Image: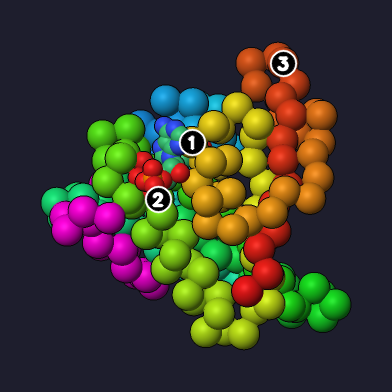
Amino acid sequence: MTELVKVEKVSKLSKRALSELCAAASEAIEDGAGFGWLRPPPQQDFERYWQGVVLVPERTLFIGRLDGIIGGSVQLVSPPPQKEAWAFACLIDTHFVAPWARGHGMARALLEEAEQEARSRNFKAINLSVRETQGAALSLYETLGFKRWGSHPKYALVDGKTVAGHYYCKEI
Ligand SMILES: CC(C)(COP(=O)(O)OP(=O)(O)OC[C@H]1O[C@@H](n2cnc3c(N)ncnc32)[C@H](O)[C@@H]1OP(=O)(O)O)[C@@H](O)C(=O)NCCC(=O)NCCS
């Protein structure tokens, strides 16, 4: 990680942070990021989405800054309280870095911070899934010790075509 990259856990988003986060996520989506949206949502909807993320108790939001500007993010999601049998494992969701902020170790730093949080909350495993087309992400997750345990041939539908996806787990 370069010295210019900083990762923080956030429970509130200032107006400026919200706007930078929307911009970074929109750029990642436009670049073909595989975290759900196919096109950036309208600004107002996107802002409401991020405001919702910081309100939902099951979601912990981490943001990454390069030179002080938000360039990426990840969420650690815990299972709902009634799912007691699943309480040992959490989930990595909406992990992205905007194209301009890539190659500085931000994605790795975000994941390491999320993993640290998972350990401190006594989770025993972290799950995630990713489209097979996200080569950089697959390589990163495998480097960080996530083991692929399965694949879904029709994981996502992108521009009318199904895309396969892979499921990973890391025991911590
Ligand atoms: C995957 C992604 C998050 C990587 O962001 P990044 O900040 O550039 O990644 P880092 O600089 O932290 O790189 C860490 C590791 O990722 C892997 N990696 C990153 N970019 C890569 C690339 N273009 N090709 C292959 N591996 C790559 C490498 O293992 C790298 O390790 P190294 O630094 O020892 O070489 C970014 O490309 C992205 O947002 N992609 C689109 C969204 C996405 O696929 N999200 C995950 C699924 S939801």
Question: Can you tell which of label 3 and label 2 is closer to the viewer?
Answer: 2
The residue located at (62%, 85%) in the rendering is 122
- Counting from the top left corner in percent of width and height, residue 4 is at 16, 55
The residue located at (47%, 75%) in the rendering is 116
Mark 1 and mark 3 in contact? Answer it, CB < 8 Å: no
Q: Which residue is mark 3?
A: 161
Q: Is residue 10 magenta?
A: yes
First in sequence: mark 3 vs mark 2: 2
- Counting from the top left corner in percent of width and height, residue 31 is at 42, 25
Write down the region rendered in magenta. 1-20
Q: Amino acid at mark 1?
A: Ala
First in sequence: mark 1 vs mark 2: 2
Q: Which residue is mark 1?
A: 136
* Whether the residue under disc 1 has CB within 8 Å of ligand 1: yes
Say left or right for 140 vs 169.
left
The residue located at (81%, 45%) in the rendering is 150
